[in-house]
Amino acid sequence: MAKEHFFYAETPKLFKKLEALSRRSGVSRGQAFEDWLTAMVCALAAETKEEEYLAMAERHKRGKAGERVIDLISEMFGRLVYAMSETDADLLGDLFEGALTYGEHGQFLTPETLASFMARLSVDADARPTADAPLLVNDACCGTGRMLLEAAKINPHVELVGQDIDPRCVKITAINLGLRSRYGWVTCGNTLTDKTQFAYRVGSFYHETQNGVRRGVIREVPIEQTPVTLISHDVRDESRDVLGGQEEATGSRSVSRPRIVEVPRWLARLEPALYRAAADEPIKEEASEDRPHQRTLF
């Protein structure tokens, strides 16, 4: 049997929690990991994926209130967020490769140092998007999103587009981007055949629920709303140019642009600064007839 191997000191702690989840729920390690990923995606989806969450939770409802197995999943999520904030490392990818896949089907993740080097070679740090030409960075076999994350470090204005045939990788990439406030798209499917199972939009948004307005960062969207079709067409056109082929007479190409109501990038970047200011400066209370308890930061 393969031996677990991890690159980060924080990963073994997550692995022990994963083993406890598997044992207490009576499911395989792989199933426990997939359920944990599903729980995190749903938690970041602002109550837009409640049915998927409830179906997953049925396998982990043993125990009394406060001691149920499902509570361990929440604890694991909190530990992951804390560890990521301390290291900024791909801990989910480390756990996935070191305790789940063991390189099955040649599935080895690109080391983060190499991903950083490749991103520096291929990403223009000075490029800026326009209204007619979004600045897209595409990884057609994104794994856990390491190269996309490195690309965003070089140019934070890019829209990240990841594709992978493994739904576990797609969920890990979405979580990695969402927890780092990166905007992008992640699709699950075969890049070579354009067959897609599902797609996520990663980026801050609001969702009004029966319990009030919720804030989320991962949202499942129709594949038609993603830039994947546009990218596929462009790749084919560029390939024909390189090979000296003729472009197919398909008429004018029309690809629908994403239209999702979400928090603008500038506001998403501004909010952390506002939170820091709120922690350092006293909050002033303003009163009026319409807003008797209006709170402001400045």
Image (spheres, helix red, strand yellow):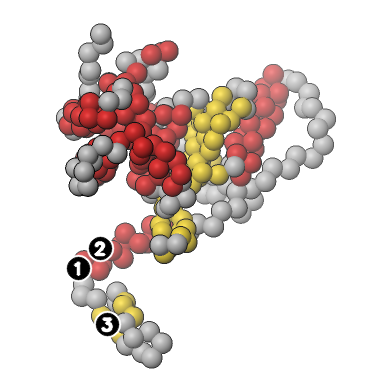
- In terms of secondary structure, where does tag 2 sit? helix
Query: Which residue occupies 58% across, 30% down?
Result: 196
Marks 3/2: CA distance?
Answer: 18 Å
Q: Check whether the beta carbons of the residues at disc 3 and disc 2 lie within 8 A of each other.
A: no
Kindly identify the amino acid type of the residue bearing the numbered disc 3: Glu
**Residue under label 1:** 280
Q: Please tell me which residue lies in front, 75 or 163.
A: 75
Q: Position of residue 26 (x, y in %)?
A: 27, 25
- How far apart are the two marked residues, 1 and 3, measured between alpha carbons? 16 Å
Marks 2 and 1, how far apart at CA? 6 Å
Residue that mark 3 sits on? 285
Compare residues 146 and 295 and report the one nearer the observer.
295
| 190, above or below 201, in the image | above
Q: Quadrant of residue 103?
A: top left
- Asked if the residue under mark 1 is in contact with the one under mark 2, i.e. CB atoms within 8 Å, the reply is yes
Q: Position of residue 253 (x, y in %)?
A: 75, 39
